[in-house]
Structure formats: structure tokens, C-alpha cells
Image (tube, rainbow, N blue to C red):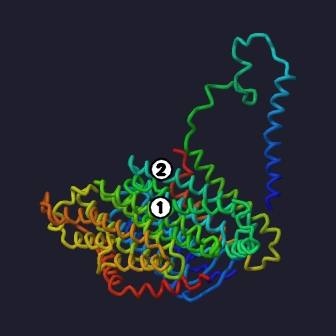
Amino acid sequence: MLADYGYIALLLIAAITVPALILLLAKVVAYKSKRPDPDNVKSSTYECGMQTIGSSWVQFNFRYYFYALLFVIFDIETVFLYPWAVYFRQLKFFGFIEMLIFILILVVGLVYAWRKGVMEWK
Amino acid sequence: MNFWLLSPELSLVGIALTVILLDLFIQQKKVLAAISVFGLIIPIAFTIALWGENQASFSGMLVVDNFSLFFKFLILGITSLVILSSMDYARKFARFQGEYYALILLSAGGLMLMGSTGELISIYIALELASISLYALVSFLKDPKSSEAGLKYMILGAISSAVLLLGMAFVFGITGTTHLDQIADKVGALVSGGQLWDSPALLFGIVLLIAGFGFKIASVPFQMWVPDVYEGAPTPITAFLSVASKAAGIAVILRVFYTAFGIAEISADWAMIFAVLGAISMTIGNVVAIAQSNIKRMLGYSSIAHAGFLMVGLAAIGTLGQSGVLFFLAGYALANLGAFIAIIAISNKIGSDEIADYSGMARRSPVISFALAFSLISLIGIPPAVGFMAKFFIFNAAIQQDLLWLVLIAALNSVISAYYYLRVVKVMYVNEPTSEEPIPSSIPLRISLAIASIGVLVLGVYPWLVLRLAENAVAMFP
């Protein structure tokens, strides 16, 4: 049993050395420009070719957070619906009722969010 | 898969969901409290109907026996008293009253599951279900103190969960299973092979488990959060934390240590850990409580001290110690709830938790003051209150196990504790009142206070009523 932990130790060693090696390699191999960078363009944030405005440490509207939470509800629902759909015939009526109850619980979450006005962008 | 065995928890979660849904459409929030309290009758009825059952289901993850049912009944009883006494207090929350009741019910569901699992992972999940609801409840007042309490509780709770999980990982690493009975087989094989302490990882895992569970029951040295969280949290939640959370923690400790590590070669070791931690817990709790001026903070330190008394029962290996711990929990729950319910009523009127502001309370409100005094007397352990019988059974169990030194420390501590409990009684009965206004209280609060106080008296006179149940409950331990 304890010997099995040896593999984890090996993985740990590999996980530390490989990224360190790659970083080191980049330092050695990469070509460094000696020319100046007057407009700070070269060291600025790259965002799909668009001009970046301000720093990335801005405050986001907290409503995004609610949408993220709601997304998690549906995400989990999908994760469980796929295997359920594959085994639908074997699970018979019991599986059908079970999944209905599961969806019902998630719907409670959705109704709650809806009534609390999460969907409205005021 | 047997859903009948899971019926108390399922119905409890059903009630919580109903409360959340109705909260969206009902303006009169008192209805929600009524639904929560009357709804609790359903899981209580299921628990009573299941009594005597002895089965494991869901591949050993759910164990229903008298032991788990005893704790389910205890936690449901505590929850109903807490909700009854919350109705006056909940007016302080302008918003989210429905969520308040629903979160209490969900947390109670987690606490109930904690006592009825035979497997480490489900213990962890049940513990998280209970804790995450409690983190939100502790910071429900949204004032600076309450928020600070919630943040402290959450951060320290997360650390203790991590420690607990690491302990479970070590135990799993040595034994290769998370099922408690299979761990016991594996440990038994290690003992008979004479290679128990070849690798110290198992001992390390056990110590980490004690650390993780010690946080839940507020024992030294994992008690740092207790005073601040107890003071900042809404008073009904402080009451819930101090009794329900502790009861579930003790349930898990009893089940894990007696089922998985019950073999004599190891139990002598963990019993000594509990004995030493218990002695330190009650001494620190009682001595520091003397210096407190805030009554919620004082009861926080008293809760640390009572964790120490409970650990005396844990250190006394055997049936007497087990049933003594269960009886002690029931008595402590009634007395502590009685004290906190009285504090809710008084602080609603005077808006303060300072002991000095309680002066002359006996003349302003004789009934509530008497109930508070009687609960405090029970916490000291003076007959005819239940606290005396509870301590008697635990000390008796410890003496049978040759733990005389521990009982001497515990008895000394009971004497120390009399000082600070009786100081509150003195302030209420001897000092001059600052005003003549009586303390108002609602009917639900009076009912819950009456149940707690009468329970303290009845169990103090007829302890057999619960002791028989406790003996039945621990009969399943080998």
C-alpha cells in the first residue's frame, strides 16, 4: 500500500522538474530584443488584438456572479442527464421518477433565483 | 437502496425546500416559522417509527440503528426549540427570514446524517452540509460583529475540514478502505500480526481525526473560534451551535472511534488523548469564563468546559461511558437551550448581552429570570437539575475505568464554574433593577422556555427516562 505512494512522489518530482526545465529552456533559447519599447506596446496585455483599456484589476458587476451560479445549476443537470439518457431503458420507471425529483430540486433553485430578481439587470 | 431508512432526512430536506418556495410567495413570514416547527413533526415521527431498526443501506454509507436514531431525535428536538425561540429574534432580520429557517433545517439534516453514517467520506459530506449552512447563519445579522464571527468560523472551519480530510486520507492509506467496519477488520489484522505501529501514519491519521472533530465539539486546543463566534452570531444560532453541533460531533467521535478503532490496543491510546484534552479543556474554559462580562461569551467558555466534561466520558471506555456521554448531551442541550432562550427574551428588551445589565432582572421578569437561574444551576451540576445526574453518570464511568485523577480535576472544575454561573444569578436577584419595565415574550418563546426548563427538572428527578434510551442506543457497539 505504502509503495503505491511512491508513484505519487515520482509524479510530484516530475511535476516540479518539467515546468522548471521548460522555463529554463525558454530563458536560454529565446531571442531577446535589445531595441527599446517606447510605447510599452510589447509589454501590454494582449486581448484578441483589441486595444486594451485600463488595467485588468477592475471591479465587475456582481450580477455576473449570479449568472455563473445559475450556469452551475444547468451544468450539473446536464452532467447527470447524459448518463441517465444512455441507461434510460435499463433504469425503467424508477430511474425516470428519480431524475424527475432531481430536476425538481434544481428547478426550486431556478424559481428561487427568478423570484429574487436575479434575471433582471437593473 | 432503502428509502424508508432515509425518511427522516428526506422529509426534513423536503420541509426546507417547501419553506424556501413558500417564502417567495408569502408576505407573512411568521407562517414560515410555523411550517418549519410543525413540519418537524414528520421527521420526528419517522425517527420514532424507525426506533429498533438495525440496518445499513446505500453500500454501508447510511447506518440506521438506535444510536443514530437517538441523535436524530436529539437534533430534531433541539432544532424545534431553536426555531420556536427564533420567532421573536427573526424580526431583527429585515430580509431573508425564509432562508433563515430553511438553512437551520438543512443544517439539522447534515447534523442528523453525521451520526448515521458508517463511512468516512459520507461523514465528511454530512459535516460540510451542516457547516456551510452554519457559516451563512452565523453571519446573518450582517453587523460588523456578526460578519467577523461568520468569516472567522468559515476560515477556521475550512482549515479544520482540511485537517480532518487529511486524517481520513492517512487512515485510508494504511487500511485501504473508508468503511468503518472494514477499517476495524484491517486494524485488527495489523494488531494480531504485531505490526500495528510499524508505520506511524495510522497514529498520525487518528490524531488528525481527533483534531478535526475536536473543532466541532469546541475542545482545547481547537477552541479559538468559540468566544468570538458565540458572541457575534444571532443568539438562536449560538444556541444551535453550542448544542446541536456539539452533539453531532460527539456522535461521529463515538461511532468512528468505537467502531473503527475500538480494539483495546488502540483505544487505550486515544482514550488517554481524550482524557488529557478534556482536563485541559475544562480547566481553560472554566478559568477564562470567570473574567467574561458578556453572557454569550461566558456561555461560550462554558461550552468549552462542557466539551471537557464530555471528553471525560469519551476517555472512560465502555458502555457506562458511552451511555453517560449520551445522557450528558441530552441534559446539556436542555439546560443550555433554556439559558439561551432566556437570554434571547431579555436581550430583545434591553438590547444588551452584558451581565451587568441583568441587574434586578428577577423583579422585572420573575419567570424568565428563574428559568435562566435554573438552567445555570443545571450547568453547574447541582441537584435537582439534570446537570447533576449527567455529571454523576460520567464521573461514575470514569472512576470505574481508574481515571480518578481526571474525576478529581472535573470535580474541582465544577466548583470553579459555580462562581461565574452564580454571579449571574446574584446580579439578577440581589442587585437593584435599573428600571421596572417587565420583559415581554411571545407565546412560542414561552413554550420553548417551558419545555427546556421542565425537561431539566424532569430529567434531573427521573434520569432513567433518557438513560434507558441511551443504554439501548449504545448497545450496538461491540
Furthest-right residue in this view: A29
Q: Are marks 1 and 2 in contact (CB under 8 Å)?
A: no
Q: Vertically, is A64 above or below B24?
A: above
Q: Chain of mark 2?
A: B
Q: Mark 1: which secondary structure?
A: loop
Residue B212, quarter of picture: bottom right
**Residue B59 placed where, x, y %?**
72, 76
- Identify residue type, mark 2: Lys
Between residues A80 and B195, which one lies in front from this camera angle? B195
Judge from the rendering whether residue B447 lies leftward or rightward of residue A66; answer left or right.
Answer: left
Q: Choose between A42 and B305: the one closer to the eye.
A: B305
Q: B393 or B307: which is nearer to us?
A: B393
> In this orientation, does residue B40 appear?
no
Image depth: mark 1 or mark 2 in front: 1
Tell me if residue B424 comes above or below residue B66 in the rendering.
above
For the point 42% across and 65% down, which residue is it? B242
For residue B219, which numbered disc appears in the image? 1
In terms of image quadrants, where is residue A88?
A: bottom right
